[in-house]
Amino acid sequence: MLTVIAGEDSITSRSKLQSLKKTFVQKGYAITDTTVSNLEEIIKDSSGVRDLFGKQSVYFVEGISNKYKGREKTTFKETVQKISSENGIHVVDWENGKSAYELSGLKRIATTFDEYKPGKNVFQLLDVCYPGNLKIFIDTLAIVSKTQDISFIYALLWKHIRKLIQTKKNTLDSSIPSWQAQKLAVQADRWDEQALLSFYEKLAGIDVSIKTNQTTYDLKESLELLVCYYLK
């Protein structure tokens, strides 16, 4: 069996992962953290299904999709597909921050696929991030931060601004749906390219400042101060 836990809301998906581990332990399973490169050995070694005390094993791994990609058939793909169809082997894969769209190939063969999407308000926050829209952004941030972890909001915003820069420079990933690319293009047009690049750099700087204790502001306060300059 193959359980995939994914979604752009990586905080919630990771919480689900930890909760699942506890559930398996309570049910008497043997929990083993392993790596993607070890999966082929696990499927070859039938003794790996149970530990020395006869407990059934559940293997936890991160990032199967990094190797399970492309259209060509590979030994690794065959291994993952076999794991998915075998009742005697259970692998739980955590895909950090990846959506079902990005994991379409893996989703098709997974026994169970759990996706944790950001709340609607988070997407609204991203949509209103452009110059001249400061008040709406600040008001939306205040609402969103009541239900979403500020670290998650920050990471999602940083990723979104990067996509806007790629849109400006015509380097956006071609796999992004046309409707989303068009939406990004409209928002990118509201930005001066140099201001957008500067905003992106300053966003990255917030993370560095907080991690190195170079600021007295927390993450939310730092973000509010930054947008006051760029979105005014």
Image (cartoon, rainbow, N blue to C red):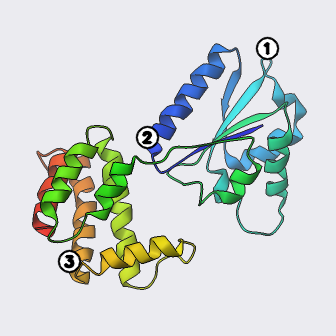
x, y percent for residue 178: 52, 76
Tell me the element at label 3.
Answer: helix
* Residue 67 in view here: no
Upstream in the sequence, badge 2 or badge 3? 2
Question: Badge 1 is on which residue?
Answer: 53
* Residue 127 in view here: yes
Q: Which residue appears at 72% of the width and 29% of the height? A: 58
Q: Nearer the viewer, residue 91 or 85?
A: 85
Residue furthest to the bottom in view is 170
Alpha-carbon distance for marks 2 and 3? 30 Å
Question: Badge 3 is on which residue?
Answer: 195
Question: Badge 2 is on which residue?
Answer: 11
Amino acid type at circle 1 is: Phe
What is the quadrant of the C terminus in the image? bottom left
Tell me the element at label 2.
Answer: helix
Alpha-carbon distance for marks 3 and 1? 61 Å
Amino acid type at circle 3 is: Ala
